[in-house]
Image (cartoon, grey):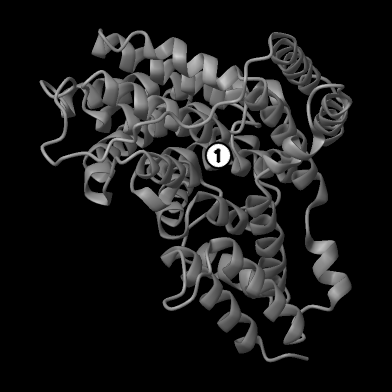
Amino acid sequence: MTNPLVCWLIFGITYCGIAVGGVPGLTLDRTGIALLGAIAMVSAGVLPLASALSAIDAPTLLLLFGLMLVSAQLRLSGFYARAAEALSRLTSHPRSFLLLLMAVSGALSSVLVNDIVCLAFTPVLTLAVLRAGLNPMPYLIGLACASNIGSAATLIGNPQNMLIGQVGKLPFGPFALWCCAPTLLSLAAAYGLLLLRYRGRLTCAQPAPLRVSVQAPPAPAPCVWQMWKGLLVMAAVVALFFTRVPREITALTAGGVLLCSRRMDVRKLLGLIDWSLIMLFCGLFVVIAGVETTGGPERFLAWLAHRGVDVSDPFALTAVGALLSNLVSNVPAVMLLVRFLDGAGAESWYVLALASTFAGNLITIGSIANLIVIEQARAQGVSLSFREHARAGVPVTLASLGILVAWLLLLR
């Protein structure tokens, strides 16, 4: 049997690498680090190959894949570009523009993967605010914050919620009903805090000169029928999520329907799938399964229980979920914490979903959506720094988590 220290060493190096985001001197990113961790678990004999493969939660990955196909259809049909361009017409009214931007991105993120919403909106938004002479910072941060917060409302808004829904076997309707109020209140709080943070500076360009891209990023040509086809399929998917049909089957069937097209190139649809995120999930499933072979999680739970700490307690879980999400990002954090919630009540699962998602706004590495906005904006010549994001993200996160705690107290 492999020495447990080897297993914990692999786990520690993997999660430290994910927290840092890379390895100095190498081009490895978080996905590459997770895959190397999984390979090390198998190569070191911690897990046989068959056990490593069985550790990968196929239903969660299939659900994510199917919903990414729906999002890809909407993106190729020009839906996101049209929505962003329609919003851009309000740039002459900065407050209204910010309000509508956050409302629309939050709503779309609740039924479509928030990472895709940020990926599609950021280039068009950045160009629009620069052309209008607005300060891009509140709008970019507003997009990231609203997408993160809005995605917490349903089980399909972000990857970590999908995992929570699958592992916790949570019904779609009760989850949305419980999470709706704190999500809407958090969105309102985020809007108010951004107005306060950028009071008098919504229409002022950054003091530093901006390298504005002279051309808009290439956008797909609008196709009305394909757009409506994608929206109708998405509506059918959400409706079926309220039934007993397995969610992964619903999402896969929807993706299969969209692949049957005379106009949409299948290769283009598949090219818009975030394979990197899917592989990140695969790697982390194996790494965490390797740690479970040591019995460490059970001993840790027993140690905490002996000291009167219950990880499934909603208030403790809020703090732990928020802290861990900002150490290693919310997806790896949730993949680790779900292992401690076996047999927990529905409220604990709801709290983990909201806390890990809300905490993603604290600093840039807390959420993949944040990193997408930063990278896409940089391609348009706008630099959103860690400090600039944190000045708005920290109060937004604290307000959101405060609303979650208040919601828990109110329900009790």
Number of numbered callouts drawn:
1
Is residue 268 placed above or below 237 in the rendered structure? Answer: below
| 367 sits to left or right of 112 | left
Q: Residue at x 57, y 25 (%)?
A: 110
Image quadrant of residue 97? top left
Q: Residue at x 13, y 22 (%)?
A: 199
The x and y percentages for residue 2 are 73, 90
Q: Is residue 169 visible?
A: no
The x and y percentages for residue 242 are 77, 19
Q: Residues within 10 Å of mark 1 (few under 14, many from 20)?
A: many
Is residue 396 placed above or below 324 in the rendered structure? Answer: above
The residue closer to the viewer here, 18 or 410, is 18
The x and y percentages for residue 335 are 62, 55
The residue closer to the viewer here, 161 or 126, is 126
Q: Amino acid at mark 1?
A: Ala
Q: Residue at x 71, y 26 (%)?
A: 73
The x and y percentages for residue 317 are 48, 48
Pointer 1 residue:
353
| 171 sits to left or right of 160 | right
